[in-house]
């Protein structure tokens, strides 16, 4: 079966059995991200053995990498949604063109971010509140990570391209391979070669290079994808650029706003102690485990909703939206209960520092109650991206992070002189508000996209009466 027939068969199976198809797409994403999360946890376990300052050195880098991930992941979401809609409407020429634009965007982002990181990275870390004791390790970690940054960005865009055509398995296998390699290299570079914190960065950089090489070989030499890359004949298309940007740029800025929120929280936490920053970092790694199924479901929804929208299957969008959100809430609720109960045991695996353990446990036991609401907001954001709406996610995230969470935390801590845990309460309140806004936005959007269908049915009915 050639790629065109495989694509048509895949689209038809999505339409015939959307709930089964959701898991067909989501499970490989969950498995792939699960392996990556496993690496993140193992990486933190290794770094945690170096002490609280080592954890803090990585923690101060986290907003920077979240910024990089946000920019590439956000624009990648625009690529995924664009390719999915073009495939759904049987427009392969523009699907190919969107993939070519993705490669060019990846190159430009890589060049810009790598240059900025190597030139201004140390200064950025200092201005983010990185203490003088931690700064040398933090800068060494960032500098080495910059060497592999471009390879990670390209690989992320390659994954977005394949996600747009419904291929989730190959990226899963490849990122899984990179993660296993990373886990193997971590103890070698950190302990055996005695590189310390910088060893974790070297392990990640080497793994990113290997993943990129395999991706490039499969896509450009073996032509694994349904879409084709004709970069020699590439010419910018305003239509494609706008199609990617209208989803991708708001999604990227949304992630950047979240990175800004991480930076603000790190600076506030640093006023308490370095242990508070380290505890927040450990808690964040554990959060990722609970959200694995949600990220998988949300990513699958972007592809499916995009294809259904391109094929004008509005009722299918309604069905898969309800199905996806309900499953996300059920799964996250179970994970939240387990995390609340076993958080002391889980945290003990990361650090023996009693103060870090106490702060991290308090954080998890407050935030656990918020997880089901975050699951709703996250899936809704990806659904709206699938139908070509990127702004809702940006606006809601900005309200949550800059409009509510940051100011509220500042008010609690610096004006009311509340203890540290009130920062977690600020997060909780902002999350509830953001979820309510996202639900209202989704309901209005579903009504809006249904209007053309309703008008068409009315016109047809009038025509029949006249006949």
Image: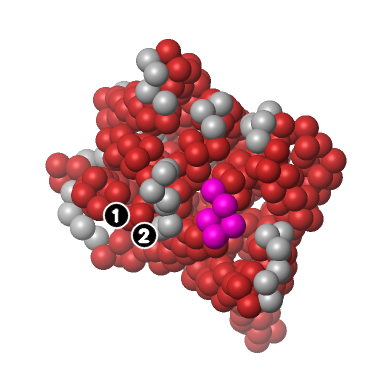
Vertical placement of 222 versus 99: above or below? above
| Residue tagged 2 | 127
Residue 343: give x, y in percent of width and height: 77, 39
Q: Is residue 273 visible?
A: yes
Image coordinates of residue 122 in percent, x first then y, are 30, 49
Report the residue at 30% width, 61% height from top. Answer: 241
Percent x, y for residue 294?
Answer: 66, 47
Q: Give the crowd class for mark 2: few <14, some 14-19, many >=20 residues within 10 Å.
A: few
Q: Nearer the viewer, residue 261 or 268?
A: 268
Q: Tell me, yes or no, whether the highlighted magenta stretch contains residue 167.
A: no
Image side of residue 310 versus residue 72, left or right: right
- Secondary element under disc 1, as helix, strand or loop, is helix
Question: Mark 1 Cα within 10 Å, few/some/many (few <14, many 20+)?
Answer: few
Q: CA distance from mark 2 to mark 1?
A: 6 Å
Which disc number belongs to residue 123?
1
Residue placed at 45% from the left, 52% from the top? 63
The residue positioned farthest toward the top in the image shown: 192
Identity of the residue furthest to the left in this view? 232
What residue lies at 66% left-to-right and 84% top-to-bottom?
462
- Magenta span: 270-274
Image quarter of residue 373: bottom right
> As displayed, is residue 95 above or below residue 214?
below
Instruction: Please report the residue visible at 34 percent of the width from the left and 66 percent of the height from the top.
Output: 242
Q: Main secondary structure of the magenta part?
A: loop
């Amino acid at each position: 079966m050639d790629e065109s027939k495989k694509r048509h068969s895949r689209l038809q199976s999505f339409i015939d059995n959307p709930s089964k198809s959701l898991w067909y797409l989501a499970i490989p994403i969950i498995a792939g991200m699960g392996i990556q999360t496993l690496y993140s946890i193992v990486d933190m376990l290794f770094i945690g053995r170096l002490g609280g300052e080592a954890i803090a050195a990585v923690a101060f880098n986290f907003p920077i990498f979240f910024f990089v991930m946000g920019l590439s992941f956000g624009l990648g979401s625009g690529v995924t949604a664009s390719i999915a809609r073009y495939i759904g409407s049987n427009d392969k020429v523009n699907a190919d063109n969107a993939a070519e634009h993705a490669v060019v965007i990846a190159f430009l982002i890589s060049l810009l971010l790598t240059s900025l990181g190597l030139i201004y990275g140390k200064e950025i870390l200092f201005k983010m509140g990185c203490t003088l004791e931690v700064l040398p390790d933090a800068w060494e970690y960032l500098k080495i990570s910059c060497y592999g940054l471009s390879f990670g960005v390209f690989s992320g865009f390659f994954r977005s391209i394949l996600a747009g055509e419904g291929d989730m398995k190959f990226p899963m296998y490849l990122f899984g391979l990179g993660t296993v390699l990373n886990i193997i290299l971590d103890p070698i570079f950190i302990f055996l070669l005695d590189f310390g914190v910088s060893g974790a960065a070297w392990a990640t950089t080497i793994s990113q290079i290997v993943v990129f090489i395999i991706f490039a070989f499969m896509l450009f030499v073996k032509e694994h994808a349904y879409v084709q890359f004709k970069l020699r004949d590439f010419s910018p298309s305003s239509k494609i650029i706008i199609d990617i940007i209208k989803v991708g740029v708001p999604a990227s800025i949304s992630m950047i706003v979240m990175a800004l929120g991480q930076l603000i929280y790190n600076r506030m936490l640093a006023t308490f102690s370095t242990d508070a920053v380290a505890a927040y970092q450990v808690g964040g790694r554990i959060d990722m485990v609970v959200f694995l199924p949600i990220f998988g479901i949300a990513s699958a929804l972007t592809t499916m909703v995009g294809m259904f929208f391109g094929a004008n299957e509005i009722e299918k969008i309604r069905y898969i939206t309800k199905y996806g959100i309900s499953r996300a809430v059920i799964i996250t609720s179970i994970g939240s209960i387990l995390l609340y109960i076993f958080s002391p045991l889980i945290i003990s695996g990361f650090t023996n520092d009693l103060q870090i353990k106490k702060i991290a446990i308090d954080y998890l036991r407050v935030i656990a109650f918020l997880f089901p609401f975050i699951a709703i907001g996250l899936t809704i954001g990806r659904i709206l991206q699938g139908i070509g709406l990127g702004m809702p996610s940006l606006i809601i995230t900005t309200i949550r992070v800059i409009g509510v969470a940051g100011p509220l935390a500042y008010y609690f801590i610096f004006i009311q002189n509340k203890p540290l845990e009130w920062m977690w309460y600020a997060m909780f309140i902002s999350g509830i508000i953001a979820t309510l806004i996202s639900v209202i936005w989704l309901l209005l959007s579903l009504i809006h996209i249904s209007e053309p269908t309703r008008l068409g049915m009315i016109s047809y009915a009038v025509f029949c009466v006249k006949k």
